[in-house]
Each structure stands twice: as structure tokens, then as C-alpha cells.
Image: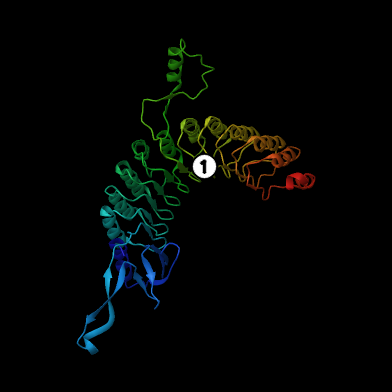
Amino acid sequence: MSALLHLFLANIVSQRSRKVVCLVVRSHDGTLICSHPSGTAYLAGFNIVETPGGSFMDSTLTLQNAYTTDDNTAGGRSSEPISKSKHAAPIRVLDLRGSHVDMDIMTQLSRGLSTNRFITTLSLSGNHLEDAAVALLASALMHNGCLLELTLSYNAIGEIGSTALAKALATNSHLRVLDLMHNRIGRDGITPWLGDTMRANYALRELKLSHNAIGDKTTIDLLQSLSPKALTEEEKLKARLSNRRHTTMSDGSGDSHNDSGPFNSTLRTLLLSNTGISDETSTHLAHMLSHTRSLTYLDISCNNFTSEGNMSIARGLQRNASIRYLNYRENKLDEVAALATVRALKASSFLETALFQDCLGGESIVGSALGQLVKTTRTLVTLDLSHCPLEPPGVVEFYYALADNTSLRRIDLVSSRTARQEFWQSRCSKTRR
């Protein structure tokens, strides 16, 4: 068992207020599942095995044919074989979800991570960790050159802890995945470092901030770091005048940008569900979508966009050339915004998953636009229209278009039907097949 895992077990078992019971080893990945008064711990060691007697041991220990000498045993030999260590693959995953890790353990764990060269995945989800504990962890990240995935979801991380993590990311060039979902990072959390951090960080691939009330300002700082700097109206005018002799520009409505400043071009996944963002963010989101070539997975569900904000985002999607997964769930779209969004998706050559649960109203023309989308798409595999009360005759066009679609593998229409849809759907036997 690695020194880091052994240290954790020694600390958690030594506390009198708790009793850790080792239950079973999962055969497919070697995870040791333990129970304790506060929940369940998953210790992924890969080299832990269950003995025939029902106990657990390190598989790096092998039994030899030699015996210990014992004067109290007949013949001077003990019946217990000698254990000898052999080389084994080091532990790579440490899963401490719901283990009620306290400050003492976090102190020990952080010290170990500072010099650890084996752990690549660490999960501390659901441990009620607060800022002080996370600050210790962030300090260790500055010196860690091995950890690739860090999960800190469902904790109590606030302004201080999140800012410490952002600082650490500015110097850590190895971490690929950071999960901070379901914490207490508010409007003053993670700033003012996140924007500058992301501009300098080219290692992080997935950033998960959903269910933190970070608001518009923080999100704008983040989005600005993921794309070239947008020009002001004055700068756009100067650019048009200087390029008049070389380029014929349309009406100036294009999203001009300045390539001189650094920006992050490696982030692939961004989760911003239920973060309190609104129309103030939408223009920056549209600018980022227009220029990113790396972002493939975007979740902006459950936010506060109005029709104007949704229209801005639709314009960004229209020009996007990378998004494969879009979660727009529970952002209400009126008819104009819905049509703009669906037409933007129709122009996409990459989109594979589109989730619009409880977004669309009952306008017939929206159903017709959806029909055109599914008729022409060659990439869309999953479409969620649950709780979207689409109405005839547009929805009939949609059903008929489904019959000719060759890419969709899953479509969700739960609670989307009306009595008239039931009638029209019964007429579309080909579509049902």
C-alpha cells in the first residue's frame, strides 16, 4: 500500500470518535470499500486484495517458503510464512468521497501531495471541506507535478479557498480536470485571479463551476480569458477605416477582435449551470463561442437569460465551429430566440448532443424549424425536447422529418405532448417505426 494511502488509513482509524470497517474489494478495479459513521470511503489502491480468511492485505506482499525461527515451536519453525515485498504498480487513484476528511487529515494529505509522484486522480467530494482545508490543498498543488484530476464538488468552498486554487493553477502545468460544482463560491470568489490564471494556464482541459452563484462579473472575466479581446465600437470603426482599401466589410456587425493579447485555447469542457449569469454575460459568451476552436462541451443551463441574451448566444452558436455538446436546459426561449437558436444549430457541422428541456414554447413555427434541423443534420445523436409543448402543424413536420433522419439515436419528448399531438402522432406510423 502506498505511503500516502497508508498514512490516510492510519489517521482515520486512529480517531476514537470513528470506526472504519473494511467491507469488500471491488474486483474490477481493486477499490477497497469502507464504511464509517459518517458515510462510505472508497480507497482505490489497485493492489489491495482479500485473503481467504476475509481480511485485507497488500498484494505487493508475497508468501515465501521460508519460516520464522521460534524456540517455542516444535522443530524451531513457526507455521507462519514470511512475507516479502515485491514491486507492484503504484496507486494512481485516491477516492475519498464522503469520508468526512477533517483538517488533520487534510494537513497530512496536502503534505503527501506536495512530493507525491504517483497519484493522478484525487476525489474529495462531499467532505464538507471549507476554505482553510482547500488552501492547504492549493499550496500542495503548486508543487505537485503528477495530479491530473481533482474533484472537490459538494463541499463548502468559498471565496478564500477558490482564490487559492486559482492561484495554484497559474503555476501548476499538469492538472487537467478541476471539479468545483456545488460549493459556495459567490460573486467575490475565484476572482480576481481566474481570468489571468486561465490566460496563463494551458494544461486545464475541464473546468466545472456549476451550482456556484459566481454571477456575471466573474463569468465575464473567465470568458474573456478564453477568446481574443473584443474590440470596442471605436476600435471597430478604426479597423474598418484602415482596412477599407484592402477589405470590403459588410455592415460592421461582425465580431471583430484583437489577436495581440494572450488567451486560453486549450479548455475543452466548461460547466456553468445555475451560476446566476444573465444577459450581461451573454454578449461575452457569444464572442467566446465565435472564436473558440477548443471548447467542445458547454453547459449553460438554468440561468437568467432574456430574449435579448438568448439572441446573442444564438449568434455565437451560428459562428461556432467546435461545440459538440450543448446543455441549454431551463432557459426559456420565446419564438424569435427559439427560431434563431434552432437555425444556429442547423448550421453546425459538429453538434452531437443538444439538450433543451423546458426551453421551447408551443409555437408551431418552432416545430417546423426543428423539423428542418433533424432533416438536415448528419451529426446530431441526442436531442432532448422534454417539457416542450410543441403544437401542430409544425410538430407534424417534425415527426415526419424524424422518419428521414439517419443520425439521431436518442430523442426525449417526455411531457411534451398535447391532445392534438396525440392525434397527429397517431397519423405518423412511419415516424413511430
SS assignment at label 1: loop
Position of 236 with respect to 404 (left or right) is left
Nearer to the camera, 93 or 101: 93
Q: How is the image coloured?
A: rainbow
Q: Is residue 118 above or below residue 397?
A: below
Q: Residue furthest front?
A: 65
- Residue displayed at 66% across by 37% down: 370
Nearer to the camera, 164 or 158: 164
- Residue displayed at 47% across by 30% down: 291
Whether residue 367 is visible here, answered yes or no, is yes
Residue 153: x %, y % from top left: 43, 53
Whether residue 187 is visible here, answered yes or no, is no
The total number of labels drawn is 1
Q: Quarter-wise, where is residue 259 in the image? A: top left
The 10 Å Cα crowd at callout 1, few under 14, some 14 to 19, many 20 or more, is: many
Give amino acid for label 1: Ile
Q: Residue furthest top?
A: 245
Q: Is residue 394 above or below residue 62?
A: above
The residue to which callout 1 is attached is: 300
Nearer to the camera, 34 or 50: 50
Residue 34: x %, y % from top left: 41, 68
Position of 7 with respect to 343 (left or right) is left
Residue 51: x %, y % from top left: 38, 74
Q: Give the position of the N terminus as an image quadrant.
A: bottom left
Nearer to the camera, 353 or 155: 353
